[in-house]
Image (spheres, grey):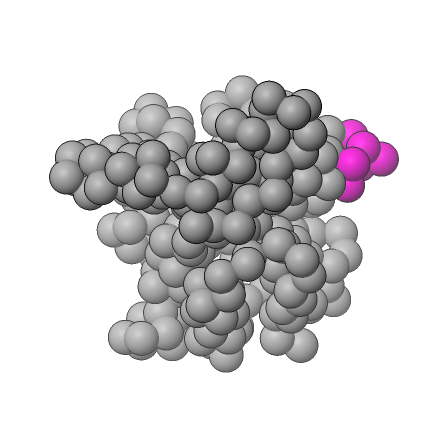
Amino acid sequence: MQPGLELSDHIATITLRRPSAANKLSPEDLPALIAHIDRINQADDIRVVVLRSEGKYFCSGYDISEVRNSQNKGSSFGEMVDAIEHCRAVTIAVVQGGVYGGATDMALACDFRVGSTDAEMFMPAARLGLHFYQAGLERYVHRLGLDVAKRLFLTCERLTAMEMKGCGFFTHLATPQELQAQVDELTATLSAMAPLPLFGMKKHLNLIARGLQDSEAIARDVLRTVQSEDLQEGGAAWREKRPPAFKGR
């Protein structure tokens, strides 16, 4: 079954729904995921995207028998992961179990990665004879560091959940019993933020990490928030000690 999409209030949920195959991704899943992100980007009221999966495993990556079909322009695996990274809304990967191969990059493309202590990861590309694509190599290096990237790509070493938190793969770690509460708390925090600075700072922080920052674009986005109704609402809510009602303008 292809990944599902639900939109509710300010939150979108994308769910991988192939638990009997450890949520392995197939060729038809790639354009479906890209289409879900496109729809989310067109929904002005969506502030947070939760990427999760059914069953014991988060995702076992791409079906190796179909790897030749993962390079088609317009629906390649790398383009799908890039679409997740470039999603306007803030993204959260909920990693309740094993995450393997290309799925590790899919999780890394998310802004936050909330993991269960039951999780583990490994990147078997070299063991399978596959050279990973450029954007994935870059994400590993700028999000985890060169030494960690080499350790994971070149040795195909498995990491435990604690090691994943220690190297920066997980931004949050919880027991299986506390995982959903951790996700709910983070989602509520993010969805309550003012959309203009939330989206703008996410975009620019990612560009800064890649050395692609645009000073003029940052200045324009700063000015846009200074002139926004939401800034006035935020100040009023702070003075009146009440939750702000942001509208994204």
Rendered position, 175 above or below 90: above
In this view of the protein, which residue sits in the foreground, 158 or 1? 1
Q: Is residue 92 visible?
A: no
Task: Classify residue 205 as left or right of residue 96.
Answer: left
Res 228 → quadrant: top left
| Residue at left offset 29%, top offset 55% | 133
Residue 11 in view: yes
Q: Is residue 128 left or right of residue 188?
A: left
Furthest residue to the right? 177
Is residue 26 one of those drawn in magenta? no
List x then y, in percent, for residue 248: 47, 50
Tell me what residue is drawn at x 65 percent, y 42 percent: 187
Against 52, residue 118 (above or below) is above
- The image position of residue 242, as x and y in percent, is 69, 29
State which quadrant residue 204 falls in: top left
Provide the residue span drawn in magenta: 175-181
Q: Is residue 48 left or right of residue 206?
A: right
